[in-house]
Image (tube, grey):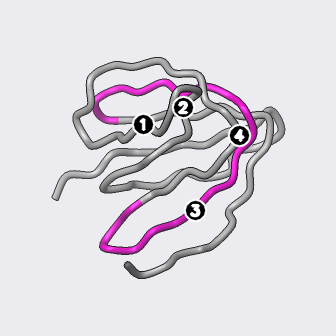
């Protein structure tokens, strides 16, 4: 199965850098789902929860406002601050 590289960064540090099968982010007009190979996208994000799915496990990251840049092979997320809320939960 294909994966997409995901990076979550704040001004102070890199918060997360890993491969994911699928991710969902809190856009300002609702949730946005990103799969590997997604077309280029620039989106504004609101505070909320990012869900990263890999190998039937979900990792949650709580974020403040920010923005996301999506390329077919990589998603970069830039936020004021973030923290991993639940390391992983099997679904």
The answer to the question of whether label 4 and label 2 lie on touching residues, with beta carbons closer than 8 A, is: no
Residue position for label 1: 32
Residue position for label 4: 47
Q: Tell me where residue 25 appears, x and y as whole percent.
A: 51, 42
Residue position for label 3: 60
Q: Is residue 44 left or right of residue 31?
A: right
Residue 44 badge = none
* Element carrying mark 3: strand
Q: Tell me where residue 16 appears, x and y as whole percent.
A: 60, 53
In magenta, the rendered stretch is 53-73
Residue 47 included in the magenta stretch of the image: no
Label 1: few (<14), some (14–19) or many (≥20) C-alpha neighbours in 10 Å: some
Q: Tell me where residue 89 appears, x and y as whole percent.
A: 49, 79
Q: Is residue 49 left or right of residue 6?
A: right
Q: CA distance from mark 1 to mark 2?
A: 6 Å
Kindly report which numbered mark, 2 or 3, lies closer to the viewer in this rendering: 2
Q: CA distance from mark 4 to mark 3?
A: 13 Å
Label 2: few (<14), some (14–19) or many (≥20) C-alpha neighbours in 10 Å: some
Q: Quadrant of residue 87?
A: bottom right
């Amino acid at each position: 199965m294909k994966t997409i590289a995901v990076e979550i960064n704040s001004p102070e540090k890199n918060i997360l850098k890993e491969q994911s099968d699928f991710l969902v982010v809190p856009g300002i007009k609702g949730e946005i789902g990103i799969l590997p190979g997604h077309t280029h996208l620039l989106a504004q994000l609101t505070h909320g929860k990012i869900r990263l799915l890999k190998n039937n496990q979900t990792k949650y990251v709580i974020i403040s406002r920010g923005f996301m840049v999506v390329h077919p092979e990589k998603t970069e997320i830039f936020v004021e601050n973030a923290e991993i809320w639940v390391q992983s939960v099997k679904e």
